[in-house]
Every structure is written in C-alpha cells, then in structure tokens.
Image (tube, helix red, strand yellow):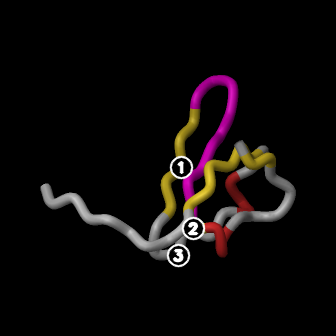
C-alpha cells in the first residue's frame, strides 16, 4: 500500500439517499450504518440537500 497526500479539499456529508451521489468522481467513499449514510467526497462534488459535518 502506498499513501499519498491529495491536494484537494474533502467534505464529510450525511445523506438521506445515495441516488444524488456522483460515484464517477475520482474520489468518493460511501459508508452506511443502521442509522445513517455518509460520504466523503471532493468539495466540488457535494450532492444537493446534505448536512456537512
């Protein structure tokens, strides 16, 4: 494994549905628990209607 420093700004967002998430963007992580769905994405790709943590 190789670690890299990325020169982008990322946001952590809590979303209600995954249909608004652009999974074609270069970097995106989707995490789901029994209580919420969260994503980590480039600031430029924040989906609409989210709460930024």
Tell me, yes or no, whether the two marked residues, 2 and 1, touch with CB atoms within 8 Å: no
At numbered mark 1, what does the secondary structure look like: helix, strand or loop?
strand
Which numbered disc, 2 or 1, marks the residue closer to the eye?
2
Q: Residues within 10 Å of mark 3 (few under 14, many from 20)?
A: few
What residue sits right under mark 1 in the picture? 30
Please, is residue 25 above or below residue 18 in the view?
below
Q: Which quarter shows the N terminus?
A: bottom left
Q: Residue furthest right?
A: 49
* Residue closer to the observer: 25 or 52: 52
> Real-space Cα distance between discs 2 and 1?
13 Å
Quadrant housing the C terminus: top right
Q: Residue 39 at what x, y percent from top left?
A: 59, 50
Between tags 3 and 2, which lies in front? 2
| Residue for point 55% across, 53% down | 40
Residue farthest left in this picture: 1
Vertical relation: 18 (above or below) 35 = below
- Quadrant hosting residue 4: bottom left
Mark 2 secondary-structure assignment: strand
Image spot of residue 52 (x, y percent): 74, 49
Q: Which mark is residue 42?
A: 2
* Marks 1 and 3 in Cβ contact (< 8 Å): no
Which label number is shown at residue 24?
A: 3
């Amino acid at each position: 494994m190789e670690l890299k420093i990325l020169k982008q700004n990322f946001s952590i967002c809590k979303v209600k549905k995954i249909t608004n998430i652009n999974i074609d963007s270069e970097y995106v992580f989707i995490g789901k628990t029994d209580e919420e769905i969260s994503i980590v994405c480039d600031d430029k790709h924040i989906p609409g209607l989210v709460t930024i943590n």
